[in-house]
Amino acid sequence: MADMLTIGSQATHAFKKALEVTSHNVANVGTEGYSRQRAVLASNAPQIVGGHTFLGGGSQVTTVERMYADYIQKQLVNSNGLVKGYEQSIAYARQVEGIVASNDQGVQQFMQRYFDSLQNLADLPTSRVNREFVLDQARSLTGHVNNMTTILKETQNQTNLQIQDLTRTINDHLNTIKNINTEVAKSEIRGTQPPNDLLDKREQSIMELSNLIGIKTFNQPNGTIDIYSANARVPLLTDNNLTSLRAGVGEYVDENRTELYIKVNGQDQLVTDLLVGPGELGGVLDFRKNVLDRAQNELGVTLNALVASNNWQQYQGWDENGEPGRNNDLFKPLEVNAFANKNNSTGSDDGSGISVSFAVPKPLPNPVNPPDTLASLGVTYDDMRTEFELSRNELGKLVPREYELRWNGTEFDIFDHITKQKLAPTDLAGNPLVLDPVGGDDEVWLDGLRFDLTSFNTANLNVNDRFVIKPHKAIMEQFSVAMTNGQQIATRGQAPVDSLGNPLVGTSLAEPGAEGDNVNIANMASIQSIKLMYANQSGQASETLLGGYSRMASSVGMFVSSAEVNFDAQKSSFSYINERREILSGVSLDEEAANLLRFQQAYQAAAQIIQASQSMFQTLIGVMRG
């Protein structure tokens, strides 16, 4: 009787536990991240009677199992991070696409109006009204581009603020996971029953963390979880030690660019590029690197080509008063200085000694002061034509790139600031040349630009001192009309005959055409239809100025289109993986209702065993008394 009573008592306890687990499932049907639990019933060890007869010992709940698959959860976390990354980068990219699209027609219209005004002046080169109208249209163009520049700069500030906010939130989530890790490790030490609800809470925190940053997780024997960045190169939580991210000003303070750091052996280590990708933070960084920076640099290349091509055509002619066009720039020429790395040697040059301009400087003599003329100074038609052709050749070499100069102890190496590719500077003739201001080699040419270190302070210069130059972003800030008087526009071209009336030859002295001559202004008006930019391997330019602008707009559109395709694909993948998780871990009310009924009936049946056992025991006692 005692065995029967024990079996019944243990059964009621087991089914009561099963009912509690089922009730817990029902209560958490709406809890995000909850994994369904199951009471595992197992038979007790049998009793051996007579040495060979086995009698059952009833049942018990051996553990409460969490219906969970680690590999599915990791897939879900990874997919979720990718979805959030694409979502964030698309949102920002569409914002820039909207800026470009809303201004696209405007830029083209303003640029077309400017070139139309040049053509009107070519039709009537003596008109003072037409001359001033050219400057008005040039100012309208620069004003419109300056508006775009301001909006893009505001977008840059917006990304800086969001990176800072996301960093704080990421660190908070990591700290929460660290605390849960501690509790899980304690539970593992105390007993054999896993802390299921605590594990669910940790998984949900990890899922929420993956919204913000791409991560990989690694389970440890003590029950804790280590967390790294998506590429496993940035430790965030290892051995339950938190490595906080820090958002701060970049190594080049004047860039106004927020970067991300971690502490390694007490030193700040830059990790921004290692976090591009999944999660909201990765999406913002991806947008900044592959859309915003690229759009600004590509727009800058177009502006630099516009400025240099118009100015150099101006230098080829003479104005209304017969003065050389080289005396007056039409647009403000590119002139930008470098930013010094904040970790450079104390007392090292602050970057102002590094100047970058268009590869071909304004031709000499400059200025030409009356009574001197180009002819009286011995400048020939060939001299002017050779310099002009060189300028056109260098225009095609402009590329949307930022530059970093690093002192290696004997000379400066020049790198692509973004890709870190080492570049090969030359002299103006294209021969390889090193940049060594200490040794006197203080000028080099690269990508249609002239790097000038003649004013560089070489004192206190140490190995690995670095400087960054952003010439194409700089022109966006500088883009303006330099000329203030329309009479200075060089409408007149080279005289068709020399002073003696002989036909023009290469060695003829440079002299202006007659008053009313329109050769140079007609050439300037034709710039809009000439391919000047993005030379191919054969050195032939492949894009007009408007084509260069359209290339920038197209690259933004292509990024958005590609990201949207990837987002849709990843969203479908996430939905599929989430469905798999729900099938395994989700709570089904129909299934739980059936379990409640089943375990309730089993509990009642077990209670009947106890009641029958008591009844039989009472009967036996009565017989003994009788």
Image: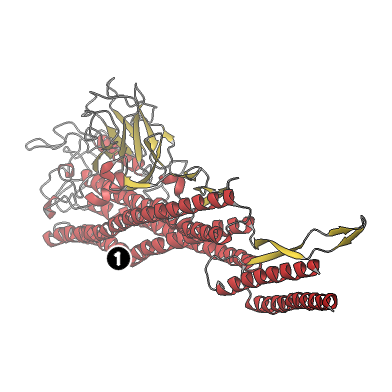
How many numbered dots are placed on residues in this image? 1
Where, by quadrant of the figure, is residue 369 drawn? top left
Q: Is residue 68 above or below residue 274?
A: below
Question: Residue at left 24%, top 24%?
Answer: 458
Q: Residues within 10 Å of mark 1 (few under 14, many from 20)?
A: some
Residue 39 found in image quarter:
bottom right
Residue type at the position of mark 1: Gly
Mark 1 element type = helix
- Between residue 169 and residue 374, name the one nearer to us: 169
Residue 546 shows in the view = yes
Query: Which image quadrant for residue 349?
Result: top left
The image position of residue 541, as x and y in percent, is 41, 47
Which residue corresponds to mark 1? Answer: 106
Judged from this view, the residue extending furthest toward the top is 439
Residue found at x 46% / y 52%: 179
Measuring from the top left, give residue 240's x and y in whole percent.
49, 45
Can see residue 119?
no
- Where residue 470 appears, as percent x and y from the top left, is 31, 43
In front here: 38 or 512? Answer: 38
Horizontal arrangement in the rendering, residue 269 relative to residue 504 (left or right): right
Q: Nearer the viewer, residue 357 or 474?
A: 474
| Residue 595 x, y percent position in the rendering | 69, 75
